Amino acid sequence: NALAYQYILAGNGLFIRAETHFFEALLLIAPCIVRGLAPLHHHFRLKVPRIPVRLLDTILADARRARRPGGGLNEVLYQFHHHGQTIQVKKPSQQTTATSVLATGMDDAAIDDASIICDLHSHGNMRAFFSRTDDDDEQATKAYVVIGKLDTEPEIWLRVGVYGYWQPLSVTAVFTGCGSFKDLYLKEASPDAPTTMNENELPCIDTEQR
């Protein structure tokens, strides 16, 4: 067993596996056909109590107050700290604009705080999606959430990250519900895609001895 993560070759591609105090995850990172090996499927298992949905509603109310003088919304960053039987939501010191949020005044100990199970940031009234900037920033092993369309039809998107690889998940994999949000995973994600592969469209590796 690797201390931080493992790469696993299976019949349907290359996977990465990691385990933290909060969850274990197995993500497909490079689909391909590997003859002679059994297939696997991406997997996520939460090892601690789920985060109460009321905290999402609290965040929605707070994010709606992050307004510029003209009335538009700025982005906001929140962090969920899981202490086993208690869960805290903290809003670190940050610089915010309509299209960005940057945590400030955080030393390495704060950034790497082992109690953080999930980072959440808002997109104001834009749709909820993970940008290229998010991909560059979200390199740890934790859950990541983005929320959007806060003043109209609030929506939410969740993914689990493992050292720069990600897998979309239902919000209820980590939270007890969606609250006032529409879960985009239920609308857009294709959780079975890794196992519905066309051999003519994927690279093939033959591990059988001839």
Image: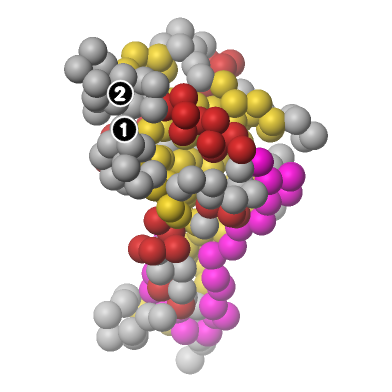
Decide which of 4, 72 is in the foreground and name it. Answer: 72
Spot occupied by residue 136 in the image (x, y as percentages of width and height): 33, 36
Question: Dot 2 lies on which element?
Answer: loop
- Residue situated furthest left in the rendering: 70
Decide which of 76, 107 is in the foreground and name it. Answer: 76
Distance, label 2 to label 1, CA atoms, is: 6 Å
Q: Are the residues tagged 2 and 1 within 8 Å (C-beta)?
A: yes
Q: Which mark is residue 199?
A: none
Q: Which residue is mark 1?
A: 124
Quadrant in the picture for residue 97? top left
Q: Is residue 166 above or below residue 82?
A: below
- Badge 2 or badge 1: first in the primary sequence: 2
**61 left or right of 8?**
left
Q: Going 59% across and 50% down the picture, which residue do you hit?
A: 177
The amino acid on which the numbered mark 1 sits, given as a three-letter code, is: Gly
**69 left or right of 117?**
left
Q: Is residue 206 above or below residue 147?
A: below
The amino acid on which the numbered mark 2 sits, given as a three-letter code, is: Asn
Q: Which residue is mark 2?
A: 74
Residue range corresponding to the magenta coloring? 29-52
Spot occupied by residue 188 in the image (x, y as percentages of width and height): 36, 63
Q: Going 46% across and 41% down the picture, which residue do you hit?
A: 145
Spot occupied by residue 27 in the image (x, y as percentages of width and height): 51, 59
Quadrant in the picture for residue 203? bottom left
Mark 1: give few (<14), some (14-19) or many (20+) Cα within 10 Å. many
Q: Going 40% across and 14% down the picture, which residue do you hit?
A: 94
Mark 2: give few (<14), some (14-19) or many (20+) Cα within 10 Å. many
